[in-house]
Image (tube, coloured by chain):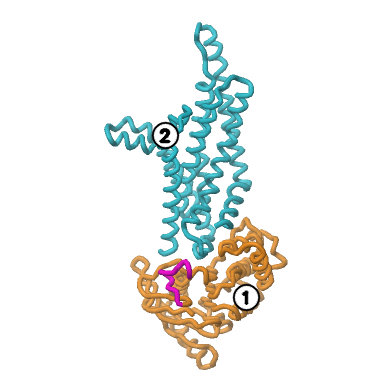
Chain colours: A cyan, B orange
Amino acid sequence: MKALLLKELRIQLLSVRFFSLLSAFSLVSALSFFSLLNQFNPLVEQAAMVPNQSVSLNELIIEPFWSAIRALLLFLIPILSMKSFASEREEKTFPLLLVAPISSFEIALAKLIPLILTALVVVLVQFSCPLLLWCYLPVELAPALMGGFGAMLIGISYMAIGGVVSAFCKTQIIAGAVSFLLVFAFHSLESFSGDFGGGFSELIQFVSPNRHLLDIEKGLIKSSDVSYFLSLIFISIVIAAERLELDRGA
Amino acid sequence: MIIVQQLSKQLGITRVLDELSFSIPEKCVTGLLGPNGAGKTTTIKILSTLFSPTSGRVTIDGLDTVEKSHEVRKLLGFLPEDPPLYSELTVTEQLRLSGGLYNISGEKLNAAVRSSIERCQLGEVSKKHIFKLSKGFKQRVGIAQTILHNPKVIILDEPTNGLDPIQLIEARNLIRSLAETSTVLFSSHLLQEVVEVCSKVILIAQGKKLFEGELAQKTGIEALENQFIQAVKGAI
């Protein structure tokens, strides 16, 4: 497993493709950050005219920034994850892994761990914007960091889902398109929860990843929220491993 | 070494293999011959644990390929029709990856990679990326990674396809030399290839065995030629 893991780490993290996508993503996120900053200045001037009115940097810049990052991840993650398994099918390299004496679970782990690390790296780089602001202005650091932690959890969960989709697809393009639709559906789940009543609404809220971020962004880490994200990743690995088992004995 | 009993495989509505039985002795090159669509690749995929049979049984060194698939994989070296090579890796990196998949590490891995490179005459391209190699060299890298972990059984699916005449001669010599240490099963749709390389042949067509025998005697080759011509005509 170690050999495969190292190969995947190298292909996923040390490739020109990854650095190009990371650069493009960081550029767009920086532009959205500076756009939020530009909108903030007039609000400060307005607030100065009203007695006892204060403006919060966290509410007006940091929270919308992390929200924008989560939305941008919807586009980046399918592009990063689609290659994982689907390229093995496209390039006909899968038999090398399938006839090797390593378990399907190990193959799935070796494929999905680098993807998860990729998502972590992408989000970690985005911490530079809030930290830069913190250096010059009175930003509350803890909520700012927790927003980033939330984006990390979302990123790695979506990446695991993208990896599983890739395990089921024969081509990278199809894997990318299906991943996008699936993570977009996950991302939008919460907005549909109000349309239904009772137990179904509660179920949708439970499944929605954004719902589990609400407390985390306030700095409150609940075991139920963390276990939700860990379960999502674990289930993804198990499903990918089961798919490989089917490949091994079709 | 390899015993195939009453092997059948149904893919959708097509019966690809029909009660196929044969045996492959230790340390010789056995050819699996048949026209296109005869069921060679399906047979090879079942032997290499990539497919499970619809019915029947395959044992390799006494181990059932379905029940003991993990143990069987340790004994096998399998080269599919398209060598499974990562174009972004160099030849040495590809071989090190392949060794790592079979839990070979450290000095043992270095020695195994060196030995494979030497046996397959890959010294001049060992630092080149796979995507820069010719078809012949890619085939050699495929064979090198197949033999890297010294498997007891080597299964080669149409390994000489698309090679030029010189590469063909080199590949034949290499395959013959593999039988010094391993049992080799070699599939081809070319009669000449099988006659040149193998000491035993199994001829199949439409999923059924037509001929199984040694090629040591001239009468064996003639009988095989007649059967093969009939099989090809039948397939057309």
Q: Amino acid at mark 2?
A: His
Q: Position of residue B88 (x, y in %)?
A: 62, 55
Kindly tell me whether residue A174 is visible in this rendering. no
Q: Amino acid at mark 1?
A: Ala
Kindly tell me whether residue A96 is visible in this rendering. yes
Pick the front one: B106 or B205: B106
Instruction: Identify the residue at image location x=59%, y=37%.
Output: A24
Instruction: Identify the residue at image location x=60%, y=29%.
Output: A129
The part of the image, by quadrant, that contains residue B86 is bottom right
Residue B2 - label? none
| Furthest residue toward front | A223
Instruction: Identify the residue at image location x=59%, y=30%.
Output: A30
Is residue B64 one of those drawn in magenta? yes
* Residue to which mark 1 is pinned: B171
Pick the front one: B75 or B179: B75
| Furthest residue toward right | B124
Q: In the rendered view, tell whether residue A118 sits above or below residue A105.
A: above
Q: In the rendered view, tell whether residue B236 sits above or below residue A84.
A: below
Provide the chain ID for the residue under circle 2.
A
Residue contact between numbered discs 1 and 2, judged by CB atoms under 8 Å? no
Q: CA distance from mark 1 to mark 2?
A: 59 Å
Is residue B90 one of those drawn in magenta? no
Provide the chain ID for the residue under circle 1.
B
* Residue to which mark 2 is pinned: A212
In the picture provided, is A117 more to the left or to the right than A188? right
Bounds of the magenta segment: B62-71
